[in-house]
Image (cartoon, grey):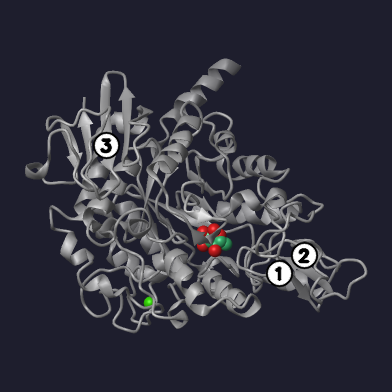
Amino acid sequence: MRAAEGSNRTARTDEAWWHSAVVYQIYPRSFADSNNDGIGDLPGIVAHLDHIAGLGIDVIWLSPVYRSPQTDNGYDISDYQDVDPLFGTLEDLDVLIDAVHARGMKFVMDLVVNHTSDEHPWFVQSRQSRTGPKADWYFWRDARPGTVGGEPGSEPNNWGSAFSGSAWQWSPDRGQFYLHLFSARQPDLNWDNPAVRDAIFAMMNWWLDRGIDGFRMDVINFISKDPELPDGSVTDSGYGDGMPYFAHGPQIHAYLAEMRRRVFDGRPDTYLTVGEMPGVTPEQAREFTDRVHGHLAMVFQFEHVSLDHDGDKWTTRKVTVSDLRETLGRWQEALADAGWNSLYWNNHDQPRAVSRFGDDTTYWRESATALATVLHLHRGTPYVYQGEELGMTNVPFDDIASFRDVESLNHYADQTQRLRVEPRVVLDALRRSGRDNARTPMQWTGDPGAGFSDAPPWIPVNPNHCWLNAASQVDDPDSIYQYYRALIALRHSEPVVVSGDFTLLDVRSETVYAFRRRLGDQVIDVVANLSVERVTAASVDLGTDGILIGNYPSDRRLVGALEPWEARAYRR
Ligand code: GLC
Ligand code: CA
């Protein structure tokens, strides 16, 4: 009986619907503005769903639209069960969910429960007294013994926040510090308190009852902290690194198991659960996403988007083909027989991939499509971030006044004021690595407002929208948009893309990224030249027959060589 149960379960999860799915991420502030206040909104999304459905997308992940003071563009939530008036109403959201479902797509919401906004009533109450019912819902600690609370050096430990400065904020009301791993307006929830977990699971159930199809869980591996909150080793920032004590903490599996039991297990449907997990290792990811015992469908790992970090994200180094192969290959291997990968180049926290890993000038189209080919033909669930399907690029921000992101603004202030770094130097780093690169308005048309809004947008549009936009690509058979459509169609039509095993080829090349997928007698080889030179591939036969997809026109394909940024997939 037990064995039969086990194998049933394996059979069911092996066929999980998300294995053949492609997800599209919407950053609502920047997608489409229906009422011309300069900020994207829910009716704006409804009006553009055919753009997404037209790509063949299976799932939409919507970044937060909950009530929020918008310190971190909605990742600071003050009411989990309402929509911020900036974006519309709960009724608008219901309309959107129905419209997504009517097109045969699923709809996943962002779940931000490591922290709330400091304006959430839970925190407002928690701050009021050390004895009230919510007193222990956040991490409150006294000042270091022998110090004067609130003065520099009196923080309970040396941790730095992800958004510069100390991770502790003094609250005169309580005469204590509270922990915030992100901005001071994002206090961390205390998951060790069962009442916190009750409230969160009730809220998740409320959303599932409303008809959504899953959650993308923000920094979910940070929810269990080492209760001692020990000092971390000091980094170049001057603060301690708390990661060893708050990432993958002692109760992480227990809390996710409880979530699974109390939110998902009793339901007849299966839901997409993707955990964002900075610092997660392949071994940990395998445990989280094990098809029988795991608690999540997949995780977002960060190794490949950290390859260009030299110490921290603001100092960069060049990424080589070997770096990519080593990292992505290791993740493919680690999750081959247990667990499941998510695949992404872009999201709202990352600079644009074509500028970062590709060539956003001469080989803009070729490199955007080559990167897409590599990613989409790996094993795992690919994510497309709004504008990626058009090859949207990083942004030539003029000056600090054009930036909006709290992380970038805090970093600028910290570097120029505390550390006296030259503004020009910090600006260069923000232009290269800042999150606002991904957050400028979606480029629908070449009109002055890029078809995003008739009002001045909340963040300037990228000047390249005059030639780089959806209107010029959607019906052009040679466009990046159409190439994404073809790649997604390939995943839907070829079981080997979904389920085939994965082997790296040409493992010593510094220009070519190549791999083989195999499922029974179905074999495809994928080969991509990630350089501006014409190259050959040692172990891939570069004929012109059997090409399933390629990013150069057939009359420009060479036998035995690849043009700059050329990618091909062959059926063998
Ligand atoms: C995640 C989000 C990011 C946010 C942070 C704090 O990393 O993706 O946008 O700033 O968590 O919520
Ligand atoms: Ca609006």
User: For residue 544, what is the image quadrant?
Assistant: top left
Please give the label number shown on residue 527. Answer: 3
x and y, in percent, of residue 36 in the image: 33, 81
Query: Mark 1 to mark 3: distance in Å?
Result: 52 Å
Figure check: 415 above or below 298: below
Cβ at disc 3 under 8 Å from ligand 1: no
Whereabouts is ligand 2, in terms of quadrant?
Answer: bottom left
Label 2 residue SS: loop
- Whether residue 340 is visible to the viewer of this picture, yes or no, is no
Say what amino acid the circle numbered 2 marks.
Answer: Lys
Relative depth, front residue between 439 and 25: 439
x and y, in percent, of residue 569 in the image: 23, 35
- Quadrant (top left, top right, bottom left, bottom right) of the N terminus: top right
Indicate which disc, 1 or 3, sits on the residue closer to the N terminus: 1
Q: Are marks 2 and 1 in contact (CB under 8 Å)?
A: yes
Q: Residue at x 51, y 30 (%)?
A: 291
Figure check: 230 above or below 447: above
Classify residue 131 as left or right of residue 538. Answer: right
Classify residue 135 as left or right of residue 430. Answer: right
Query: Mark 2 to mark 1: distance in Å?
Result: 8 Å
Query: Mark 3 to mark 2: distance in Å?
Result: 56 Å
x and y, in percent, of residue 435 in the image: 46, 65
Q: Which residue is the site of mark 1?
A: 123
- Quadrant (top left, top right, bottom left, bottom right) of the C terminus: top left
Q: Which residue is the site of mark 2?
A: 134
Please give the label number shown on residue 33. Answer: none
Classify residue 17 as left or right of residue 310. Answer: left
Figure check: 276 above or below 333: below
